[in-house]
Amino acid sequence: MKILVLNAGSSSQKSCLYELSNNTLPEQPPKPLWEASIDWTVASGFARLKVKANEVTQKEKWESNNRRMDIAKMLDSLSDGKTRVLEELSEIDIVGHRVVHGGAEYSEATLINPEVKEAIARLSVLAPVHNPANLEGIEAIETILGSSIPQVAVFDTAFHSQMPQKAAVYPIPYEWFEKGIRRYGFHGISHKYCAGRAAQLLGKPLDSLKLITCHLGNGCSLAAIKDGISIDTTMGFTPLEGLMMGNRSGSIDPAILIHLLKEYDFNAEQLDEMLNKNSGFKGISGISADLRTILEAIAQGNERAQLAFNIYIHRLRAAIGAMVASLGGLDALIFTAGIGENSSLVREEACAGFEFLNLKLDLNKNASSPVDKDIAAPDSAVRVLVVSTAEDWAIAQECWQILTKVRESKS
Ligand code: AMP
């Protein structure tokens, strides 16, 4: 079965192709046959394509005024040139898309039809950067591969859809909950994948575990997972709530916004820009949203960079503590994404807050660039895992399951 995955960001489109057996799914992510990404941020009005396949990496840059044509060009490299892995694009059996917002309606991966497309478009008001880009990818595939190719939407909100109401409803007048203002949570594809992988690594059934997954990348969120279900998470109505992030503030006192509106003549766009683009590591340090740059600045004695790091860790520990309380215990703490997988310092500092739980890190294992490993000391009461997140693989698995069911129902 050949599965194409599209993962659209605000200014990028990543894609990969998996070839899987029709009979069983491998336990661990296989290497994709082909990987590609388009970056629309390199230079204004230009698209840069990077393709990896057949042990070859190719790069190309062109003037761009139509993102759908750029996506078509990216897909051409599947059946053309040195990165060719298919005779024809029609060999693709199914296409899976990461869709950021599925609202309250979608609690699982879903075959795309006009109604699903309409819902993704309608939910764009809640994810104005991502949902339109996701829809663009879906429509580009319809144009390139024809409307009969099955396409699947895998929602980043779906994993959190079973959160109990006490975690999902904001304590504001109830009518707003009825109008859809509630906590949705995000990064669900990653949290779900990491929880499943952690259960595999621990050799225990997922439905017997209390887990906290820490997705720490440019965007950061935690999920409290009990018996395989997300019962609490740090992101809420939008991906702005919760932890401090690269450019995003995370949670702040909402009265600050009222103050800025009233006393400083801020408007909605300025507030949006401040909280989503100019806060977090970037806003405090004044240097960068990237933790690596912050750590370099700290090494050179930059006090604002140090303060940014200290706030990040303080808030991360506080949020982990809140998730422990929601779970009423903890079997494993799991770190993933750019920071979670690569920064031994962040893992060490985060864990240092939980020695009272008898959570003990093995510092040598923590420093050893662990991938899918338990880095807790043997006598730790809580396991600590580093899991390499595999969102594209999780999307491919959902596609495999859906297409297998469709084929079974036809046979
Ligand atoms: P992601 O959004 O998952 O791609 O994560 C991106 C973030 O991971 C970057 O902004 C960096 O701050 C962080 N990151 C990646 N590699 C490292 C590293 N080796 N050490 C510290 N932070 C890293």
Image (cartoon, rainbow, N blue to C red):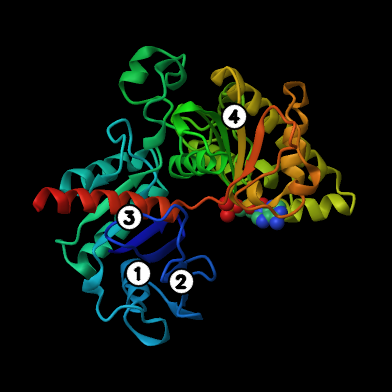
Name which residue lies at 37% across and 73% down.
74
Q: Are marks 2 and 4 in contact (CB under 8 Å)?
A: no
Q: Of circles 1 and 3, which is in front?
A: 3
The answer to whether any part of residue 255 appears in the image is yes
Which of the pair 316/341 is nearer the observer? 341
Mark 2: C-beta under 8 Å from nearest atom of ligand 1: no
**Residue under circle 3?**
24
Q: Earlier in the sequence, mark 2 or mark 3?
A: 3
Question: Percent from the top left, x then y, of residue 324?
Answer: 61, 22
**Residue under circle 2?**
45
Rounded to the nearest angstrom, the CA distance separating label 1 from label 3 is 30 Å
Rounded to the nearest angstrom, the CA distance separating label 2 from label 4 is 34 Å
Image quarter in which the N terminus is found: bottom left
Rounded to the nearest angstrom, the CA distance separating label 2 from label 3 is 44 Å
Q: Secondary structure at mark 3?
A: loop
Answer few, some or many: residues within 10 Å of disc 3's Cα (few below 14, many 20 plus, some between 14 and 19).
Answer: few
Q: Earlier in the sequence, mark 3 or mark 4?
A: 3
Answer few, some or many: residues within 10 Å of disc 1's Cα (few below 14, many 20 plus, some between 14 and 19).
Answer: many
**Residue under circle 4?**
251
Q: Quadrant of residue 125?
A: top left
Label ID, residue 71: 1
Q: Are marks 3 and 4 in contact (CB under 8 Å)?
A: no
Name which residue lies at 84% across and 49% down.
298
Q: Are marks 2 and 3 in contact (CB under 8 Å)?
A: no
Q: Of circles 2 and 3, which is in front?
A: 3
The answer to whether any part of residue 249 appears in the image is no
Amino acid beneath label 4: Ser
Amino acid beneath label 1: Ile
